[in-house]
Image (tube, rainbow, N blue to C red):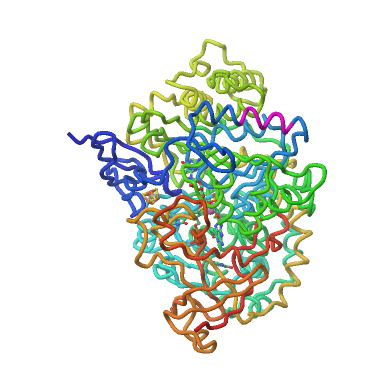
Amino acid sequence: MPRTALRICPLCEATCGLTLTIEGAAVTGARGDRDDIFSRGFICPKGAAFGALDADPDRLRTPLVRRDGTLQEATWDEAFDAIAAAVPTLTERYGPQCTGVVLGNPNTHTMAGALYPPLLLKALATRNLFTASTLDQMPKHVSSGLLFGDPFAIPVPDLDRTDFLLLIGANPVDSNGSLCTAPDFPGRLKALRARGGTLVVVDPRRTRTARLADRHLAPRPGSDALLLAALAHTLLAEKLTDPGTLLEHLEGIGELTEALRAFTPEEVAPACDLSAEEIRLLARELAAAPSAAVYGRIGSCTVEYGTLASWLVDVLNILTGNLDRPGGAMFPLSATAAAPRPAGPGRGFALGRWSSRVSGHPEAKGELPMAALAEEIETPGDGQIRVVIAVAANPVLSAPDGDRLDRALSGLEFMVSVDPYLNETSRHAHVVLPPPPPAQSAHFDFAFNGFAVRNQARYSPAAIPLEAGRMDECEIHARLILAVSGRHGADPRTVDEAVIADTLARAATDPRSPRSGTDPQSRVRMPAGHDGPERRLDMMLRLGPYDLVLEDLRNAPHGVDLGPLTARLPGLLKTRSGRIELLPEPIAAELPRLREALADRPTALVLVGRRHLRSNNSWMHNVPALTGGSNRCTLQIHPDDAGRLGLADGGRARITADGGSLEVPVEVTDTLRTGVVSLPHGWGHDRQGARLGVAATVPGVNVNQLLDGSRLDPLSGTAVLNGFPVELTPLP
Ligand SMILES: Nc1nc2c(c(=O)[nH]1)N[C@H]1C(S)=C(S)[C@@H](COP(=O)(O)OP(=O)(O)OC[C@H]3O[C@@H](n4cnc5c(=O)[nH]c(N)nc54)[C@H](O)[C@@H]3O)O[C@H]1N2
Ligand SMILES: Nc1nc2c(c(=O)[nH]1)N[C@H]1C(S)=C(S)[C@@H](COP(=O)(O)OP(=O)(O)OC[C@H]3O[C@@H](n4cnc5c(=O)[nH]c(N)nc54)[C@H](O)[C@@H]3O)O[C@H]1N2
Ligand code: SF4
Ligand SMILES: [Mo]
């Protein structure tokens, strides 16, 4: 008899509630859970393929251990024995900085990825942390750190109440949203239009999102910081600013006005390839809207001035008085966040507290640029990385110059991958530790609830019991931490219990914590749960702002609605001044570089990426239900450019940039503006030694091979993945 079970979908940031159909130990169907308090039945093709993804025969079932040069199936004990025999010896020999930790995107989609990596870093005592953030949203963390003193204080558009939404470099109709968790993002955009609101999309491609908009601007890629600076300039020059109650929390508005003086619409227009009139009009509309939110994503982050653009997005929200008010850009408050504290000065946010060894890149939020990982492994000397622990990461395809990283990883003395697949990256590991498929894992969105357009909390216990021979990913992480730190064989629960004891002790004695002084017998201090991760979740809920316990979530399988977003200023500010620092010093120091960019003009051809609804970065090309159709690795080009270059639809071309060249199939389409071509990322599944049977049949090419890793947004260390120059030649 089939049964059903609820499971939050971990396949993108929308966190839809799914109803899984389960027969025996297999997921045979998935539909949207109509009673889910947040997603209300929405599902996309990826969620619908949950069962196929769960059952992918290429998923590893047992650990792999390298013996005589080849990866062979092994028991869990053998795998952790191998790690315990290697890592402590190497760190003793070379010092703790010989280890590097690489964290990929799915860590934000698992409980294990939220709870254990900080402990792993502490156990290794290394500063060599590389994550997908420096291929993604690090500019936003840096701008929030500088403006608000907290890199995680990222405001989200109050989608369901706003009157005006300006989307910059985001395509939520295909991506389903990012740094803005909103199941059925497309439906919410349509609802905005239906209630008389306005949607403006800024994107060099006429995306499916742009097609929903009232207005679509298609500027030259990489020019958003200039456009946003001109919008802010216009608000200030035309006295259209209205910060309202924010004013008392602002520092530096006079300095900001001065710093943006050069960025008039007339000055930026040629560099953006827009008209000064349309820029002025947009500024006036933004100011006139009863409520408005500006939101930027990948196309505003992984570009040359990513941190400046991310900062200006919130400068606009502040100047128009839309930050922290309903219908504007608001700060969510998740159920596992620390309970709000009284306002006051904080510790502030510092950049560049240390630098990378080889190129001297400043750290940001404790991370070094992923684009610098290969050189840190390859370059001999004190502090050379010789051991890599990669968790849910495939940088060989996701980061610039995968061929170089490929060579670098193959020269490591030891590598561990926690990954369900033997893929382009994990094939270099000495030990691969495979987590179970999602249906066998419990789920709670520690990360995405903090970016959700409505405050809510939902918990999914594992839908299917762990298959024999499987190990829960939380236990894998706990055992890994023990194995690398000389505590191999200890009970993995001790890892969680140490965190619980430590956190409760700190909460009780922290004078600014609203939970300080609670007596040891109070309900706040008595976490419960079936295992370590559940107990930690329960503890965080108890210490959190809503006075919830895990049992409350168990009793509400479709979720607990915690209401619309509410104002959080000034309590959340952690700057040294205790105010919003509008023109932080590192930003001011970057503005001269942006002034020089006023002289930039459209060049012959630049490349941008794109995402396909039925795909996700590098790891979903192995599921037949999600492949084929329009989900192809083609080079899209405007008909005018194709004609000029002698390229035909369905033909082939050679594309060349700084880092290398590739042969690509050509797709002619007028959805791009002229001067811009688009190639998606996550492809290039043609390397030996991977075990991705379906993906290998249609491998595509790795767009990141066009990059050499030297183009970075300097403040955040984020790779420039969009808007770099390329050349094209036809192939017979
Ligand atoms: N050119 C270009 N490059 C890009 C981008 C772009 O837009 N253009 N986008 C960038 C962005 S935004 C990102 S986030 C990065 C992503 O970069 P990565 O995180 O390196 O890439 P993913 O493809 O998400 O790979 C995730 C890995 O996690 C594994 N995995 C899947 N599920 C689980 C799980 O439950 N547990 C564990 N332990 N592992 C799991 C997969 O098998 C895969 O190996 O790529 C970046 N690269
Ligand atoms: N289906 C699907 N969903 C996903 C993913 C996926 O791979 N597939 N990946 C997930 C991840 S890891 C992330 S980070 C999110 C990303 O979520 P989004 O940011 O919404 O996704 P993208 O499709 O990368 O949208 C970026 C847009 O920026 C445009 N762009 C490029 N350069 C510029 C520029 O210089 N200026 C402007 N204004 N626009 C520019 C591109 O044309 C593109 O349409 O999506 C997540 N969801
Ligand atoms: S939109 Fe995202 S969370 Fe929702 S079903 Fe699709 S992949 Fe899953
Ligand atoms: Mo991402």
Q: Is residue 104 visible?
A: yes
Question: Which residue shows up at 45% across the image and 81% down it?
Answer: 651
Q: Residue 161, relative to residue 653: is it above or below?
A: above
Q: Residue 681, relative to residue 265: is it above or below?
A: above
The answer to which image quadrant residue 210 occupies is bottom left
Give the prevailing secondary structure in the magenta stretch: helix
Q: Indicate the position of residue 724 as horizontal and vertical percent values.
A: 63, 70
- The one of 697 and 673 positioned closer to us in this rendering: 697
Q: Indicate the position of residue 197 as horizontal and vertical percent values.
A: 41, 63
Q: Residue 671, relative to residue 552: is it above or below?
A: below
Residue 450 lies left or right of residue 173; in this view the side is right
- The one of 459 and 486 positioned closer to us in this rendering: 486
Q: Is residue 248 visible?
A: no
Residue furthest to the right: 382
Residue 664 lies left or right of residue 183; in this view the side is right
Question: Which residue shows up at 45% across the image and 54% down it?
Answer: 616
In reply to whether residue 134 is colored magenta, the answer given is no
Q: Indicate the position of residue 700 as horizontal and vertical percent values.
A: 47, 65
Residue furthest to the top: 521
Q: How many marks?
A: 0
Q: Indicate the position of residue 429 as horizontal and vertical percent values.
A: 58, 43
- The one of 215 and 468 positioned closer to us in this rendering: 468
Q: Residue 2, relative to residue 130: is it above or below?
A: above
Magenta span of residues? 83-91
